[in-house]
Image (tube, rainbow, N blue to C red):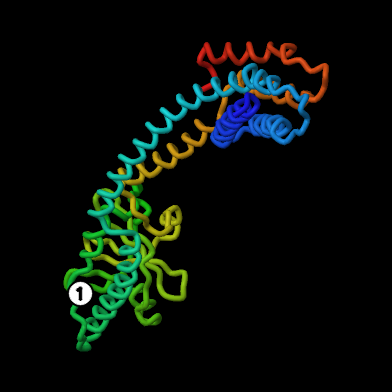
């Protein structure tokens, strides 16, 4: 292997390292530096000019590429240490998320069960109506609290203002055993065929409230699970309620999930963000390479050693993270 071949081999190794660093940082100036450095290498690699001085390529790398590689590699090691720490934290968080997910019902389970519960409440109210008017009923539903007992803690929305669930004054009720149903509500339910849809649940002062909507209407009513009372939602007081679907609200899972999302973004920021000083050096270095003409007889590397000094100073100071 000739001396020129050795220079080209070492040059190629530098090109590979520079490409890896360009992919890591994803900085426009650095990518341009890589492209121009590879172009300079190609000039020597594909040239048939026997008078071309390959030592000039080696000197270029010593004066510029090696210093840049040293600087960016040192910064990369620091960044990778932070990235690894973040990844380890994400891994630990995921273990806790999976652990809590395994002992809780999934969102899909809740969505399926809430549909069955809607039907169950409709059947329950129809059963009460039949008994009130003296008709025999084959439905025997004695308790509606099992759904809230199973899902309220993890899904029902925490709500501080109990006034949102206050009933209108002087309401008339039908009563059967331990259940009370507002008279107007019972009539409206009878017209709709007792078809209702569970909207969402709330926890307010340790009491469970459930909001329902009558099928094919905007009529909404409240079920106070604690005292088995059904009544129309007071539009004036209940208008402030958040009526969006309940979602799994485990604070630990939610907090850890949000934290992991932030750590992923932080890793991206750590990878790609460089200090102003380093960016200035890259910008200046790119400008120099754009103006270089290796084939010119007047070309001199020594004229640009100020950039080399700047890079070395940054390297020694350990700046640029």
The part of the image, by quadrant, that contains residue 230 is bottom left
Question: Which residue ends up furthest to the bottom in the rendered image?
Answer: 135
Residue 126 to residue 81: above or below: below
Q: Quadrant of the N terminus?
A: top right
Label 1: element kind = strand
Percent coordinates x, y for residue 16 in the rendering = 57, 34
Residue 103 locus on image (x, y percent): 22, 54
Q: On the picture, is 231 further left or further right than 53?
A: left
Kindly give the residue lying farthest to the right in the view shown: 297
- Residue drawn where x is 37% and y is 73% of the image: 196
Please determine whether, in this image, residue 17 is positioned above or below residue 305: below
In this rendering, position of residue 260 left or right of residue 109: right
Give the camera-side residue of 61 and 192: 61
Crowd class of label 1 (few under 14; some 14 to 19; many from 20; radius 10 Å): few
Residue 223: x and y in percent read 30, 64
Q: Quadrant of residue 185?
A: bottom left
Residue 48 position, x and y percent, is 76, 33
Q: Quadrant of residue 192?
A: bottom left
Front residue of 18 and 285:
18
Q: Residue at x 43, y 37 (%)?
A: 263
Identify residue for label 1: 176
Q: Give me the residue at 20% from left, 88% from top.
A: 136
Q: How many marks?
A: 1
Q: Residue at x 46, y 73 (%)?
A: 217
Closer-to-camera residue (17/288): 17
Left or right of 10, for residue 56:
right
């Amino acid at each position: 292997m000739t001396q020129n071949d050795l220079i080209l081999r070492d040059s190629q190794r530098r090109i590979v390292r520079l490409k890896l660093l360009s992919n890591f940082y994803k900085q426009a100036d650095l990518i341009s530096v890589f492209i121009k450095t590879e172009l300079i290498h190609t000039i020597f690699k594909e040239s048939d000019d026997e008078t071309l001085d390959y030592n000039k390529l080696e000197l270029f790398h010593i004066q510029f590429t090696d210093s840049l590689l040293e600087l960016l590699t040192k910064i990369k090691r620091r960044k990778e240490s932070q990235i690894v720490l973040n990844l380890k934290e994400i891994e630990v968080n995921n273990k806790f998320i999976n652990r809590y997910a395994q002992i809780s019902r999934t969102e899909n389970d809740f969505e399926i069960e809430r549909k069955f519960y809607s039907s169950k409440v409709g059947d329950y109210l129809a059963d009460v109506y039949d008994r009130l008017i003296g008709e025999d009923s084959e439905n025997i539903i004695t308790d509606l609290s099992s759904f809230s007992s199973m899902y309220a803690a993890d899904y029902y929305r925490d709500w501080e203002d109990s006034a949102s669930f206050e009933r209108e004054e002087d309401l008339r009720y039908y009563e059967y055993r331990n259940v009370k149903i507002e008279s107007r509500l019972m009539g409206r339910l009878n017209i709709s065929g007792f078809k209702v849809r569970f909207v969402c649940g709330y926890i307010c002062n340790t009491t469970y409230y459930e909001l329902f909507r009558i099928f094919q209407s905007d009529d909404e009513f409240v079920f106070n699970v604690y005292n088995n009372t059904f009544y129309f939602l007071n539009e004036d007081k209940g208008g402030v309620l958040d009526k969006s679907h309940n979602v799994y609200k485990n604070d630990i899972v939610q907090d850890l999930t949000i934290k992991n999302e932030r750590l992923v973004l932080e890793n991206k920021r750590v990878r790609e963000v460089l200090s102003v000083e380093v960016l200035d050096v890259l910008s200046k270095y790119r400008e120099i390479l754009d103006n270089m003409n290796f084939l010119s007889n007047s070309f001199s590397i020594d004229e640009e050693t100020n950039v080399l000094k700047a890079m070395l100073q940054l390297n020694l100071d350990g700046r640029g993270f």
